[in-house]
Structure formats: C-alpha cells, structure tokens
Image (tube, coloured by chain):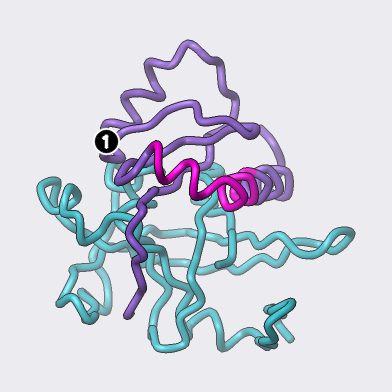
Amino acid sequence: MVAAELRHKNDVSGVIDFLIDTGADYTTISVDAAQLLGLYDLQLSAGCPPSVRGIGGVVPLRYLPSSTLVFHGPEGQEPAIWQVGNLAVLYVDEAQRRNPTFRGTPSLLGRDFIQHCRLEINREDPMLFFGG
Amino acid sequence: MATATASIKRYITDREWIDANYDLLADRYDKQYIAVSDGRVVASAPSIAELKVELSNATLLMLEMPTVVYMTKDSDSFLL
C-alpha cells in the first residue's frame, strides 16, 4: 500500500491508501475513499472510459478534475507530486455504497501512474521511485 | 492546515498503530469502520455514512481528518 494525499484544486482533500495494481489500466478512487472524502458531493464529470471492468463486474466512473496526488518520500526528500488531471472515481449510487462488496476495497494506483515510475520489489523494503 | 507531508506522516503513523494492534481492534470492531487519531479510536460505525455522522457529533475537536480503516476478522484476499 502507498499513502498519497489527494489535492483537488486548492483544497487539501485528504489522504488515501492506494494498492499498486500493475493489472489496472487506470488509477481509481474506491467507493470507501470517495465517501470518506465527500467526493460524491462534488461536481464529478463524465469522461473516458465511462466504466471499468473488474472481477466483480462493471462499475461506472466519474472524474474529479484538476486533481493532484502527493506522495510522501523518505525523510529529507521532497514529496513526489503527480498532477493527474481528471482522476477516476468509482461511481455507484447510494444503495450500492452500502454493498458489502465495496467495503474495505482499496483505491488502485494503475499503469497510468506506474508508467512514470521505477518499481523495485524485495521482501524487506519495496520501493517506488517516481520519475525514476 | 497542515502541510501535505505532515498529513501523510500522521496518516502513516496511525496506520502503523492500527497494524500493530490489528487483531485486538478486529476483535472489538469486526466489520466496522474505525476512525483513529493519535493512537486511539475516536469513532466506529458499520458504514462510512454513519461514521461521518459519529465524527461530526464527536465532542473531540479534531483539526485533521482521522485515519479510517475497515476492520474485519475475515482473511479477505484481493483478486483485482
């Protein structure tokens, strides 16, 4: 898991835990995180792709414009900043938000982010180098 | 408002506390969301919507959003 702070326009929205998912085309904000940060109360726009397909089926997407993710780096280093632009949010209605399927399901860092990184994996200290 | 780095540091500290106490917390708060701030649970509820109500009713003055995690004793695995 990687923690990142979501910034929307000039407002700091909050910190989100992301699972790095090399099988995901797009970075997506989970239903839990969207509810917690109040993203469903904001003006989310339609965009492309309009939905994502996962093992559990197809889920519609809406997009949070002007989004930036800030990743905390090792002590003494500047944080890594990814200016996402339109950030995909899993978009389900209020009834579905109570669906246990979505509970605890993480937000995903997909290949749209990973393509900017060098990922080194070892058991002791997995590291993600942004822009590496 | 805290800086980005301060917010993430605090979040990571809270996550580490949750991980260190996961079994105890999962026993007590099975299938609930918990909100943690500075190493203590400040609210719990079975849904995010109810948790947000709990937090808004809390008398504790919190300048920062607490760290929220879904607790379960089930050994969930992800297939994404």
Question: Among the chains, which one is cyan?
Answer: A
The percent position of residue A108, horizontal first and vertical second, equals: 43, 71
Residue B27's image quarter? top left
Q: Is residue B53 above or below residue A99?
A: above
Nearest the viewer among A83 and B37 is B37
Residue at point 10% right, 47% down?
Answer: A95
- Span shown in magenta: B14-28
The percent position of residue B56, horizontal first and vertical second, equals: 39, 21
**What residue occupies the far right of the structure in this picture?**
A76
**Magenta stretch, overall SS:** helix
**What residue occupies the far left of the structure in this picture?**
A95
Name the quarter where the C terminus of chain A is drawn.
Answer: bottom right
Residue at point 37% right, 58% down?
Answer: A64
Q: Does residue A46 appear to the left or right of B44 in the view shown?
A: left
The percent position of residue A83, horizontal first and vertical second, equals: 57, 67
Nearest the viewer among A4 and A1 is A1
Q: Is residue A39 above or below residue B77?
A: above
Q: Does residue A84 appear to the left or right of A49 in the view shown?
A: right
Q: Does residue A64 appear to the left or right of A11 in the view shown?
A: left
- Colour given to chain B in the rendered image: purple
The percent position of residue B34, horizontal first and vertical second, equals: 42, 38
Residue A62's image quarter? bottom left
Q: Chain for mark 1?
A: B
Q: Is residue A56 magenta?
A: no
Nearest the viewer among A34 and B71 is B71
User: Which element carries disc 1, helix, strand or loop?
Assistant: helix
Residue at point 76% right, 64% down?
Answer: A73
Name the quarter where the N terminus of chain A is drawn.
Answer: bottom right
For disc 1, the marked residue is: B49
Q: Is residue B18 magenta?
A: yes
